[in-house]
Amino acid sequence: MAMEPFPSHKSDPDDSELLGLLCRHVGSIVRDLPAGRMKIIKMKVWLLPLIYTGLYVLALVFAHRPLLYYGFFSLMGFMTVITFSSVIHELCHGNIYKKQSHKRLAYYLFDYLGANSYIWQQRHLLLHHRFPNVNGWDADVEQKGPIAVFPAEPVRRVNRFQHLYIYLLYPLFMLNWLLVRDFRDFFSRSRIIRKVVDIPLVEYFRLFMFKAGYLTMMIILPVLLTGINLLQSLLGLVVLCVSGSLLAMIVLLTPHINSGNVFPSVDEKGIIPLTWLRHQFVSVNDISNTNWFIRNVMGNFNHHLAHHILPRFSSVYAPEITEAVKAFALEHHFPYRSYTLSDSFRKHSQLIRNNAERAARLDDQVN
């Protein structure tokens, strides 16, 4: 399959100079911060998966008490998302280990948790960070189901009701990711990632091997080791995915997919009419640091603008970097935005409703 060329951003030497200035300034700030902060995140690389595994063992021990069994699986769903936001996302950007051998070993954490580390890295690094909120190029926001997200994407008749049924689909997010989305990215040539990635054969083997291992661990082993029935085992996985999905929606939706952000388009010449730097400012928002959950669970997803502009700096330095970005935006007239968690969800709901209303208008015109 022929690879498509990436879109290009508008070129502006002044913005390039400003980006270099900001990078040098932030670099000087981070050099003066305590290097010992990194010890905490390196500890999390092994501590969080151990907690997840411990919860699994406890679920098996108390398998004949269904409420406890489901409770431990629910906590495993939360730990999946916490491990992703606090550790795996950092690993993907090379912010924890420098040695490639250490990185490769740690990447297997994502496969252990049921997702595919290879295809997610490709989606996230090659497309999302280059083209956030761009229809046809942001694979992290890509939708091919009954939800219209992008303000300019075509809508169908079913989308007129999406502001109602979307809340029934959100709890299924992880089930879709674990059992559907990864396979679609590997096998469907219509997926965005297939425009730019020729997947190595060995990755197909890894996909099936780890997915089979995950399903064996979650469904087959509880039946074989504890004697519970298959229905309880299946429900345990569903509970894990639903609880994880609800937390994942808080972490993943709030920094991008809302009516307060811009969704840039690629013109007929393959150009995005914004510089890369301005693109980040208009398509990404921060989440206000208002409580313990946001500060300690969301990782780089609450200080998200700083992460998009300077992704190679760890979230342990994000509060200071964000202050530098806010000062930079004020001085050079860039549109910095930070919302509370509730405001971000309200704006997300408005975006979904806007597309529902657009679908309704088109449907009325047809009829």
Image (tube, rainbow, N blue to C red):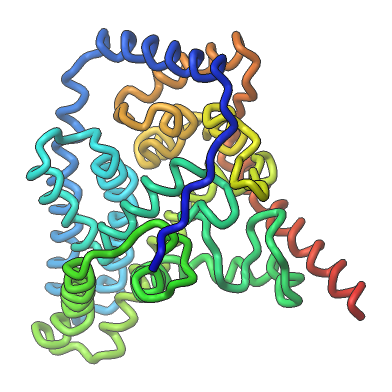
Q: Looking at the image, is 270 positioned above or below residue 296?
A: below
Q: Which residue is at the front of the view, 144 or 250?
A: 144
Quadrant of the snapshot with the N terminus? bottom left
In x, y percent, where is residue 320?
Answer: 39, 17
In x, y percent, where is residue 46?
Answer: 12, 46
Q: In terms of image quadrants, where is residue 238?
A: bottom left
How many marks the image carries: the answer is 0
Residue, x 15% and y 74% (percent of image)? Answer: 60
Q: Looking at the image, is 184 positioned above or below residue 316?
A: below
Judged left or right of residue 229, residue 196 is right
Q: Looking at the image, is 133 positioned above or below residue 69?
A: above
Judged left or right of residue 40, residue 158 is right
Judged left or right of residue 144, residue 46 is left
- Residue 176 appears in view: yes
In x, y percent, where is residue 71?
Answer: 30, 67
In x, y percent, where is residue 92?
Answer: 27, 44
Residue, x 60% and y 8% (percent of image)? Answer: 331
Q: In terms of image quadrants, where is residue 90?
A: top left
Residue, x 39% and y 49% (percent of image)? Answer: 124
Residue, x 27% and y 63% (percent of image)? Answer: 116
Q: Which residue is at the front of the view, 41 or 57?
A: 41
- Residue 338 appears in view: no
Quadrant of the snapshot with the C terminus? bottom right
Q: Looking at the image, is 43 positioned above or below residue 355?
A: above
